[in-house]
Amino acid sequence: MVPGLPLKNTQASTGDTFEAAVLAGLSRRPRAIPAKFLYDAQGSALFDAICELPEYYLTRTEITILRDRAPEIAALAGPGRQLIEFGSGSSVKTRLLLDSLEAVAAYVPIDISGEHLEATSRRLRADYPALAIVPVCADYTDLPMLPWLPGSSGAAKLGFFPGSTIGNLDPDEALAFLRNARRLLGPGGALVLGADLKKDPGMLHAAYNDSAGVTAAFSLNLLARMNRELGASFDLEGFAHEAFYNPAAGRIEIYIRSLRPQSVRIAGQRFFFDAGERVHTEYSYKYDLADMDALAVPAGFVRTQTWTDPGRLFSVNYFVAT
Ligand code: TRP
C-alpha cells in the first residue's frame, strides 16, 4: 500500500451509479432519489452557502459549541486516542478537536469522496506535521464493509460524527450505524455526536426554506445535475423545492414538487409527473435527549455528557461504549 493515499473501499462503498439510482427512484412510488446525489460540485458549493445563511443555525451553532467545549471533550477522551471521523468532508470541525486532544495516535477520516480526502489530508498534514493521518475512502454507512482500519495499534478510539448527519438516516439506519460504529470503536471506545435538537417548528421551517432561495437552488440542482449528467430535459421552472416539519415523525421532510403535469426525458426514458407530484430527497430528523438515548442504549453506548448552546438549538453529545 502506498502511504498517504486513501484506502479505497470500492463498489460496495459507492453503491448505485447516479443514472441507476435516478431511473429506479423515479420508477417507484413514492418517488425518491437518495440525498447523497445532491452533493455534486455545484451542490456542495450551494450547501456551503446554506451553512452561511442567517436562518441555517445548525453549522455555526455546532462550531461554537465545539470551539467552547473542545477542552472538556479532550479531558473526557484522555490522551493517546485514535480519532475516527465518519464522513469527514473538509474536516473543519475536526480541527477544533485536534487543537485540544492530547497525543492523538492517528486521525482516520472516512469519506466517500476521494478528492475531498486527498485535498483535506494534504492541508491537515501541513498544519499538523506530527499527526499520523490515515484517510479511508468509504461510505460511513457501510462500516461493515470496512474489513479493518489501519493503524489500530491498540490505541483507544474516539469516533466523531458531527453535522447532525445522524438526522439524515432513518431511525433503523441510525441504529444500524451506531451499532456498527460501536463495533468499530471497540471496548473503551467513545463517540462525539452532533445532533440538531427539536425546537419551534417555525424556526425549523425557516432553516429549510431560506428567504434568499439558496436552499431551493440546492434542491433543484438535483434536476440540473440530471440535465448535465444524464441528458435529462427538466425545465427547472416547472418544479419547486418543498420542505416542512412533520411533528409526528419529528423530522423535516424535503421534496421536489412538480408544478404542472409534464413529461421529462431521462437517459432515453420518459417520465410523467402529475401536477403536485413530489419526489422525496431527504429527511432531517430532529432529536431530543430521550430520542438520542433510545438509540444509544440498544447500540451499546451510554450518553455521559451533552453540551448545547444557550438557545438549546443544537447538541454535541459524548457517548461511551458500554
Ligand atoms: N444535512 C442537512 C440537514 O439535514 C441537509 C440539508 C439542509 C438539505 N438543507 C437541505 C437537504 C435542503 C436537502 C434540501 O440539515
Image (cartoon, rainbow, N blue to C red):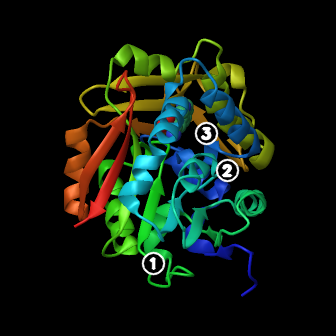
Q: How far apart are marks 3 and 2 (CA)?
A: 37 Å
| Disc sitting over residue 90 in the figure | 2
| Disc sitting over residue 271 in the figure | 3
- Image position, residue 240 (x, y; %): 59, 21
Residue underneath mark 1: 155
In front: 296, or 75?
75
- Compared with residue 249, is residue 39 higher up or lower down, i.e. above or below? below
In front: 208, or 221?
208
Of callouts 2 and 1, the N-terminal one: 2
Q: Is mark 3 within 8 Å of ligand 1?
A: no
Q: Is mark 3 on a helix, strand or loop?
A: strand
Pick out the residue farthest to the bottom. Answer: 1
Amino acid at pointer 3? Phe
Nearer to us of marks 3 and 1 is: 1
Horizontal side of residue 231 vs 277, given as left or right = right
Horizontal side of residue 25 vs 213, given as left or right = left
- Image position, residue 282 (x, y; %): 48, 39
Of callouts 3 and 1, the N-terminal one: 1
